[in-house]
Image (spheres, rainbow, N blue to C red):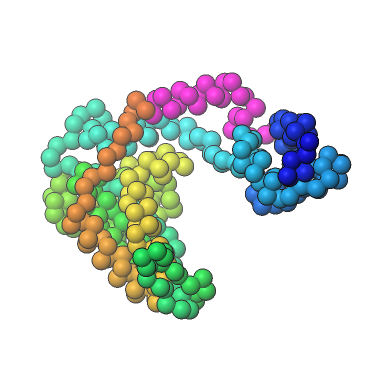
Amino acid sequence: MVQRDGISPELRRVLRRPQRELLFFGSSRSNDQGVHDQGLTPVVGRAIAGTISASTVRRWLKQDALKPWQYQSWIFITDPVFRSRAKRVLDLYARIWNGEALGADEYVISADEKTSVQARCRCHPALAPGQTRAMRVNHTYGRGGALAYLAAYDVHHAKTFGRCEPRTGIAPFMALVDQVMTQEPYASAKRVFWVVDNGSSHRGKKAADRLTVAYPNAVLVHTPVHASWLNQVEIYFSVVQRKVVTPNDFTDLNEVADRLRAFEDRYNATAQPFQWKFTTSDLDDLLARLDRHTADHPEESSAAPAT
């Protein structure tokens, strides 16, 4: 008996084995649609089936555990002092520094830059959402330039200080520092800890010294290399991306800056501190799992290949 899609039950059982993926894909790593279409040729060409539709291939692959066109990327830990740097940041989020609790006049600021916030002027006005219709935004747009949005987020008081600059750099970052450190309660605080990543605007000991010279009560604390996910201001930037600059439909950069400032004021009026749950214990568990994985899979080591 042959079913409606032209495949007999016996042939279907053969094609449902894991070897089917090898037949369809071989070493192919193309996109979803391309994989489905490419899968037709060997099946028909080898006379496994007289005819087979692309929709049948898609339906089979949707049900399978193996999806060769999907993949995940990751990055190895390269910072030799990853744990100690990460622990300092996590301790600050828990209001601890060098094993001692922070005082009421000590603050933790998380800061970074959101680069290339563009102004895309749509060639036709966007249509507001209707009762049964989502908002419609024209695909075609004109480029109105881009700016950098710098933000400093008070971790325990959920207050954000932001500014727009033509580009990132040491001078724009120090302007953000001035904006925060000349205001109370930070100007007269015992210590203000600035958590930053290793971007060029605030990288290394020179950046730490530059901050201390400008404001003796400021302490620069770096996240580990490739660990910006430990910087809480990135959560704020994700909110900005969803609620402010998406969909991107701005006449010019002035409109972008005005929208960012208006959102910042609205956010500060209602925000609560983020419920940060990743602790030093979680960090130790994560690093232990990575160590076990590295021991079990030495071929995936991050060591540089021999030349």
In the rendered image, residue 222, in percent from the top left (x then y), is placed at: 37, 42
**Is residue 277 one of those drawn in magenta?**
no
- Which part of the image, by quadrant, shows the N terminus? top right
**Is residue 306 one of those drawn in magenta?**
yes
| Direction from residue 163 to residue 8 in the image, left or right | right
> Can the viewer see residue 301 in this picture?
yes
Q: Nearer the viewer, residue 126 or 159?
A: 126
Q: Residue at x 40, y 64 (%)?
A: 132
- Which part of the image, by quadrant, shows the C terminus? top right
The correct choice, above or below, for 265 with respect to 226 in the image is below
Q: Residue at x 82, y 42 (%)?
A: 49
Q: Nearer the viewer, residue 45 or 116?
A: 45
In the rendered image, residue 113, in percent from the top left (x then y), is placed at: 38, 56
In the rendered image, residue 173, in percent from the top left (x then y), is placed at: 34, 58
Q: Nearer the viewer, residue 67 or 254?
A: 67
Q: Residue at x 73, y 44 (%)?
A: 4
Magenta range is 283-307
| Direction from residue 191 to residue 136 in the image, left or right | right
